[in-house]
Image (spheres, grey):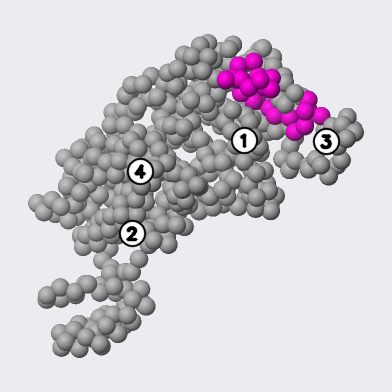
Amino acid sequence: MLKLWNTESRTREAFGPISDDEVRMYSCGPTVYMRAHIGNLRGYVIWDILKRLLKADGYQVTHAMNITDVGHLTDDADEGEDKMIKSAREQGKTAWDIAKEYEELFKQDAQNLNIILPEPPLLCRATDHIAEQIKLVQDLEEKGYTYTTSDGIYFDTAKFPEYGKLSGQPLEEKLAGARVEASSEKKNGTDFALWKFSYPNGLSREDYLASNSDLRASDLPERAMEWPSPWGLGFPGWHAECSAMSKKYLGQPFDIHTGGVDHIPVHHENEIAQSVCAYGVPLANFWLHNEFLTVDGHKMSKSLGNTYTLEDLNSHNIEPLALRYFYLGAHYRQKLNFTWESAAAAQNALNKLRSLVREWDAPTEINLEYDDRFMAEIMDDINTASALGVLWELVNDNSLETPVKAATLKRWNTILGLGLGEYIGKPLEIPANVRAIADRRWEARSNKDWDTADALRLELENLGWLMEDSDSNYKLKLKK
């Protein structure tokens, strides 16, 4: 039985879906104002494994994920400017171009990491669902949960006594601990924006300029992303999109909501508040959160220059699937520290695994004892680290025939997503010209003709092959 740690109950619970044969799952997706870094990508790999695991357990999985392309301000307290607008200004592009560029890069990164993303419309953009977000705010307004300030429509958290349940911090503590700046019109420090005005009091740009004679048109740049609403010209708050789109595509309540631990105290608390108040039922039954990735023991930050991307890893000859393997080496609820040494170790381990499974014969039937052990680990709150331990026990068990190993590992690979299907029981095909050069190099080496051997070794490398020598023979492998 699958057991998952539920952040809301702070216990490991036996999982059971709302519908017998279907699991409805929502994952907080990227804000597409910059390239996703390896800390961002950790969670998407873990939730991909969860989705694969659920499918392997016989469920149909309906998975939705948002693309935040508007409304995510630089400060979670609804201060600062929209991250999309800020990035567009810094790069000299439009916000729409920024969104398109980084959404495509995210999709490429996901594909390279063997992540199975939802298909549209379940991979859903905030800007494609403005009407649904406006309807959510209208529902909350009709039920008395909102108030208006000069800069937008806000949710009154004091009217939702369960606010803080997810983080475990009671409402009164949250209200007391969140400061309201003297200039703010917010009633409580925890209140959050549902709809932000482009210009004060929902005015259009023209009306705002007309009411401020000391302003010139050039002093007030036009906002690239804004929409008319019942309250005036503006754009949705960041939190509204997840509630609106999950309701549309999954209904409410749905089974599983995932995200990073940084979402717990603000974003997910706010999602719960607005969804429960709007629709009168829980948002999700299970809340799962992955821990942070650190780099050399430090938090990832631009100032430290350690917000590495897949492109950075490629320059160090680390494949995306080696990064996926690296992620699996720790439980998703534990912090994981990235170093270039640990990444190289993951690449070497994956290379070794590929090399070993190539030598196996074609798959026949799985070993039930090993399979039961592997599944027991992976079903225990997605314990990938322990599952990898069982995997290597199987690989190194010389008492098992290779066709049985191959069948067992092939089944596990559908869950782990390490791309081993291309290697299991498939010997490396070496072109005749490469084999001929390797034979000539081996002969030169045997004759201690080191200059010729070195030249032929370089010729092999230029063709994309490495030659490993032993006392009695050589072995060829593809250069990574």
Mark 4 → mark 2, Cα distance in angstroms? 35 Å
The image quarter containing residue 423 is: bottom left
Q: Which mark is residue 422?
A: 2
**For marks 3 and 1 on the same chain, the one whose residue lies earlier in the sequence:** 1
Asked whether the residues under the numbered discs 4 and 2 touch, taking CB atoms below 8 Å apart as contact, a structural biologist would say no
Q: Is residue 129 visible?
A: no
Residue 257 at least partly seen: yes
- How crowded pointer 1 is (Cα within 10 Å; few <14, some 14-19, many 20+) is rated as some
Q: Type of residue at label 2?
A: Glu
| Distance in Å between CA atoms under marks 4 and 3 | 47 Å
Residue 219 x/y as whole percent: 81, 42
Marks 4 & 3, CB-CB < 8 Å contact: no
Judged left or right of residue 162, residue 333 is: left
| Residue at the (18%, 42%) spot, across then down | 370
Residue bearing the label numbered 3: 205
Question: Residue flagged by tag 3: what amino acid is it?
Answer: Arg
Residue at the image point whose x is 62% and y is 29% from the top: 78
Residue 129: image x %, image y %?
A: 65, 34
> In the rendered image, which residue does mark 1 sit on?
73
- Region of the chain picked out in magenta, as a range: 179-203
